[in-house]
Image: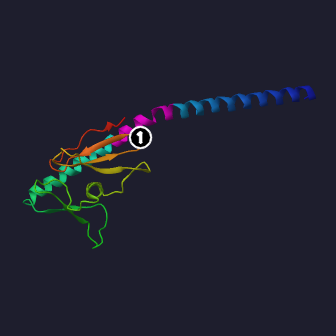
Amino acid sequence: MTALQVSEKSEKSLTEVIVVIVLVALLMASFIFYFFKQQGQITRAGFESIAQVFSARVTGIRAQWFMDSKPRSVSVESSQVQPDGSHMVKVQVNKSGWVDTTNTSLSCQIIWQYVMEAPLLYMKEPVGAVLVEYENQVVPYCQYSLSSGEYFTYHRHNGKVSEVKLAY
């Protein structure tokens, strides 16, 4: 093989490598672009799932309240080991059987803990828990929201969990 043939082969290989690198970079850039473009929809879909799980668990706790002859608190099986070593947690309910608490300062956070058995986090992002009260409103309700504006509400007096809405 002559020196000319060796240099032509090296140029071909270098050109092929550059073309492959450019193609891979373009594919990565397009993937990142579409991921960030769809990230809001992915976040909303996941938070809607959280709201549905919240609603299902609230309904399950109320069903247990009915089965236990309407006590003031309901013992529910927990996925976590409790301080006493059992897998049962006592959940406070109101006179209608919906998850509620007598603690007024952190009531929405406590309700979340009872129902979800998890910290107020979604995809490593904090979930805001606020007790919403208006002057002309008879019964306050809890609002659980993300910093991106999505939120759902839980009405403690009737157990209604709203659909996920966007604040802005």
Name the residue furthest front.
135
Q: What is the three-letter code of the residue carrying label 1?
A: Ser
Q: How many numbered badges does the structure rendering display? A: 1
Is 25 located above or below residue 102 in the figure? above
Q: Is residue 2 visible?
A: no
The local secondary structure at tag 1 comes to loop
How would you classify the magenta stretch by its main secondary structure?
Answer: helix
Q: Describe residue 37's horizontal placement relative to residue 81 as left or right.
A: right
* Rendered position, 124 above or below 14: below
Name the one closer to the observer, 74 or 162.
162
* Screen quadrant of the N terminus: top right
Q: Is residue 131 visible?
A: yes
State yes or no: residue 41 in magenta. yes
* Location of residue 120 (image quadrant): bottom left
Location of the C terminus (image quadrant): top left
Q: Is residue 99 left or right of residue 53?
A: left
Q: Quadrant of residue 32?
A: top right
Q: Position of residue 24 (x, y in %)?
A: 63, 32
Q: Which one is in front, 84 or 91?
A: 91
**Residue 136 picture location, percent across and down:** 18, 44
Residue at image position (37%, 38%) is 44
Magenta stretch, residue numbers? 34-47
Q: Given the current orientation, which residue lies at the most extreme bottom position?
A: 84
Dividing the picture into quadrants, the one containing residue 147 is top left
Can you give x and y, in whole percent of width and height, for residue 41 in the image? 40, 34
Pick the front one: 59 or 100:
100
Q: Residue at x 35, y 42 (%)?
A: 47
Residue that numbered label 1 is attached to: 148
